[in-house]
Image (spheres, rainbow, N blue to C red):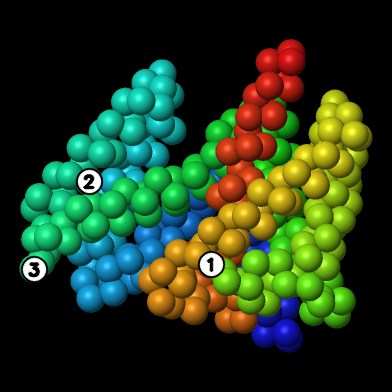
Amino acid sequence: MITRIAAAAVGLAVLLPALLWGDRLAVEVLVPAAMALCVYEYAGMAFPEERRIGAVWVGAVLAVLFGATAHLPWLGVAVPGSLALVASLWMGTLAPGAELERAADRVGRALLGAAWIAQLGWLVFLRRLDGGLAWVFLALGISWLGDTGGYFAGRFFGRTPLYPRISPKKTWEGALGGVLSAMGGALAIRAIGLPTVPPAHAALLGAGLCVASIWGDLAESMLKRSFQVKDSGTFLPGHGGILDRIDSVIFVAPLLFLYAGWSQGGG
């Protein structure tokens, strides 16, 4: 536990100043950097015998998908999605692997990894909104406070397994503790940086998006079990890899952007 807390403290000591004083550029740089680390970790899980090829493959598809969406938003979703599919098939044709009958599986793994990691890019879009810094903090706060609250509530009070087939250590008591922590964090962030958001909305966002974050964590656990690995990496002592820390943010960020866009659009 001490290693886990120390690693989190060091990470926050770097992340918080960058977000607070780095303006939009900080997110525009940090998110792609985190994506690159995630690609390397994912390639190690999905392509264990050819990690470099897998990383280049997933990274190329992700660059097309995120680059087109982030910098040419007028293209919408369909065109970047089509470009990503074409890029993946192109890479799959160039590197079909020794077993040709598994080529479709390799293309599927590459597309899944790129599309999954690309969801982190919604943090960039949140930062571009009015009050964007607070929206980014809300996404991270709900995700990480929910995870932290769930960890300690599960550790001290957990009795009832939540989904033992996927994640044996998660409990319903831990999930409840996570939801309550996320609600408290959402209300605090709303009070400090998002005063136009009604308190009831902030509480509902905390609860609902915490459920989404738990689902994101379970989704990654499912993939790790499928790939037969314990952690996505070893980058963060006591936590695992970067993917192990941002799996919940991947599910929270796009949903929060939908709400933020709706609220700023006069809905």
Mark 1 lies on residue: 221
Secondary structure under badge 3?
loop
Where residue 172 sits in the image (x, y, percent)?
78, 65
Residue under the point 20% across and 37% down: 86
Asked if disc 3 and disc 1 are in contact, CB closer than 8 Å, the reply is no
Asked if disc 3 and disc 2 are in contact, CB closer than 8 Å, the reply is no
**Cα distance in 3D space between marks 3 and 1:** 28 Å
Asked if disc 2 and disc 1 are in contact, CB closer than 8 Å, the reply is no
Quadrant holding the N terminus: bottom right
Q: Nearer the viewer, mark 2 or mark 1?
A: 1
Q: How many tags in the picture?
A: 3
Closer to the chain start, of discs 3 and 1, is 3
Image side of residue 180 versus residue 9, left or right? right
**Residue 88 numbered tag:** 2
Residue under the point 37% across and 21% down: 75
- Residue 261 in sight from this viewpoint: yes
Secondary structure under badge 2?
helix
**Cα distance in 3D space between marks 2 and 1:** 25 Å
- Residue 28 in sight from this viewpoint: no
Q: Nearer the viewer, mark 3 or mark 2?
A: 3
Where residue 37 sits in the image (x, y, percent)?
42, 63
Mark 3 lies on residue: 98
Residue under the point 85% across and 26% down: 196
**Cα distance in 3D space between marks 3 and 2:** 17 Å
